[in-house]
Amino acid sequence: MKRPITEEDIQGYVDCALQPERHDEVEAYLAANPDEASRAATLKADAATLRAALDPVAQEPIPMRLNLAQIAARRQSEKLPAWRMAAAAMVLIVVGATGGWAVRGYSLPPSEGVAALAQEASASYTTFAGSAVQPVEFKADDLSGLADIASRTLGTKTVLPDLSRSGYRLMGGRIVSTVHGPGFMLMYNDDKGDRLVMLARHMIVDQNRPMVEHADGKVSGWTWANGGMGFSLMGATDAKSLHPIADDIRAQLSTM
């Protein structure tokens, strides 16, 4: 008996991470289910967009000042005591393991932690917020259904933040593929047509992190993590004006 096709299989298919036999089974399933095939195609497009946005930064070389050989040679030339050499090497190992060089205001490179989540949320905003056709995959007409989809995607009970006090209405959401696993994006708009995007996903690095600011061209916002879940709010406005909205979201999400 064949195993049923799960969301994990769909994500694995999108990421080309399945064994050949399972890949063929998922492909046959998608051929028989046009709606799921359309969703998988959208996920692949999302992944391609994120790769295009993140790959140039991820490929940036480690700064020379953090190169292990360079630092060891420099320390040797200074003839430091052995205990200081050991301490310096240990610090370097820890820094390298956690990506400790500063990039755009973060203590981790964009391929990890809240820095990566901020980049993914910014890319999601750029990709979907300007769409006049289908900015969201699941509309907010059915809030309970939308919350259920978000919960199944993230694997935990999900709260849909209410931003009406800030003048924003929930439009809906969509499943977003990231290099760190599936995320769920919510989109909001106001009476002027301005839109905000909030992206949530599980965190491998930075499982608990205070709110940090992000700016990428015209897109800016705030990103944080709590209890292994990361959240990022982005919009085409200055980060300062988004800070109270991000605080409101964080307070509402504390019940998750």
Image (spheres, rainbow, N blue to C red):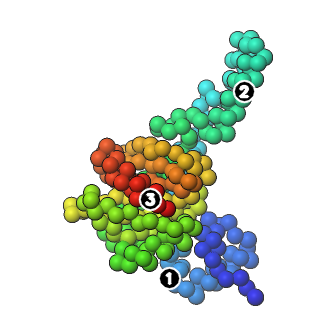
Above or below for 199 versus 141: above
Residue 198 vertical position relative to residue 11 in the rendered view, above or below? above
Q: Which residue is mark 2?
A: 89
Specify whether 52 is left or right of 73.
left
- Going from the N terminus, do you reach mark 3 or mark 2 first? 2
Find disc 3 in the rendering and name its residue: 253
Residue drawn at point x = 60 percent, y = 69 percent: 11
Q: Give the image location of residue 113, x and y in percent.
A: 56, 47
Which mark sits nearer the N-terminus, 1 or 3? 1
- State the residue position of label 1: 35
For the residues carrying marks 2 and 1, which lies nearer the camera in this image? 2
- Give left or right: position of 140 versus 63: left
Kindly check if marks 3 and 2 are in contact, taking CB atoms under 8 A apart as contact.
no
Say what amino acid the circle numbered 3 marks. Leu
- From the image, state whether disc 1 or disc 3 is nearer to you: 3
Which is nearer the eye, 65 or 83?
83
152 versus 227 height, above or below: below
